[in-house]
Amino acid sequence: LNLLPIVPSFHPSHKSSETSTSGPRQHHQQRTTTMGRITIFSADGCPHCRRTQAALRAKNLPFVKISITQYPEKRDDMIALSHRISTPQVFFNTRHVGGAKETMALLEEWETDQSRGYRNARERYADEIERFADPTNERFAVPTGEPVKVDAGPPRGREEYSIVLPWSKEKTTVLEMTELLKRVLPSQSIHRRMTLHHLCFTLEEAIRALENQYAGISSDDAVQFFHHLIQQELIVPVESNFTSSTPSLQQQANVLYRLQCHAEPLTLNTYRVWKEDLQGVTPAQLLYHLCNLMSQIQHAISNDEGQIDYTAGK
């Protein structure tokens, strides 16, 4: 792949930009001249983004990262420039290189191609990218505003957020506990105040089911465990008269609850605690959210170079 040296801008005043080399990461120092750059549109937690950045650092090539997670408005710019929705999308100046696979292949070519007389990739970068002027296309502009903060709900699968059985201190995962609750808790349709509530159960029914499942525990233990499941958002209240305090079996025996996985039956991933407004979400937006979730899983089991340990992800 032979790339032409077309250069996007690097403005010193852009606070959200970061240049990287093979050494420690440093925020860009103010320059007196305008230079070209490598731009990476990336997503937080994306292992392919991390792998690409690690490859650039290994060859001592600085780059600017634009996070479409922290600045979602830049996603439209990325798509308009690359005609792709996946990350990373890499540009050498304004010339689109591609994703991680294409970028790694190009860097390998730079390393092995001796026909142009460059001693290393850094020399070629300086000659074909850095020495050219900034472009005027605003889609390459690095955002300067505050990054967005996304509330993704309670973490799932981390050690400190595992489900703990208070009477034995044993731990289980959110998935395992949810599957167990689906089997042991009664899920039925109940009429209340001229409303038919589906897939729900009363507090009394839940406590009795937990006592039957875990032989020998007291009603108080079952109530405390039920409250723990509410705090972890595995169980959610159905009615508006719910209080956040520990439920009382005597006073709230008939209060209705349902499993979190039954609370949003029209979503593709019912196990996730959706904090976003799901009204009017398009299939493309839902796919984007789920891709982010998969990226978070891959991020949790990948090293600093973006290599994924799939065995650890089982």
Image (cartoon, rainbow, N blue to C red):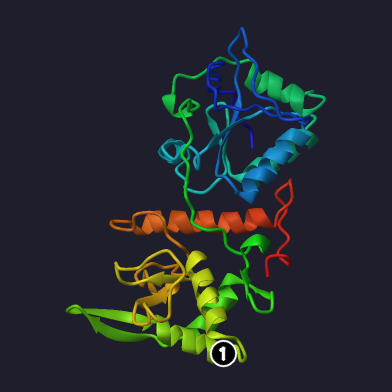
Task: Return the residue nearer the eye: 215 or 98.
Answer: 215
Q: Is residue 50 above or below residue 59?
A: below
Q: Residue at x 19, y 78 (%)?
A: 193
Q: Nearer the viewer, residue 274 or 52?
A: 274
Q: Amino acid at mark 1?
A: Gln
Q: Is residue 54 visible?
A: yes
- Tag 1 secondary structure: helix
- Coordinates of residue 89 in the picture (x, y in percent): 55, 41
In the displayed structure image, the side of residue 180 where residue 245 appears, left or right: left
Farthest right residue in view: 119
* 90 shown above or below 151: above
Residue 266: % across, % down: 34, 70
Q: Is residue 48 left or right of residue 140?
A: right
Q: Which residue is mark 1?
A: 213
Residue extending farthest top: 32
Instruction: State which quarter of the image contains the C terminus.
Output: bottom right
Q: Residue at x 17, y 79 (%)?
A: 194
Which part of the image, by quadrant, shows the N terminus?
A: top right
Classify residue 167 as left or right of residue 264.
right
Visible residue check, residue 179: no
What residue appears at the point 45 percent right and 27 percent down from the top-left corner? 145
> Residue 113: horizontal and vertical position, in percent?
77, 33
63, 238: nearer the viewer: 238
Q: Is residue 245 left or right of residue 193?
A: right
Give neighbour class at mark 1: few <14, some 14-19, many 20+ (Cα, 10 Å). some
Between 157 and 124, the one lying in front of the other is 157
Image x and y of residue 24, in percent:
76, 30
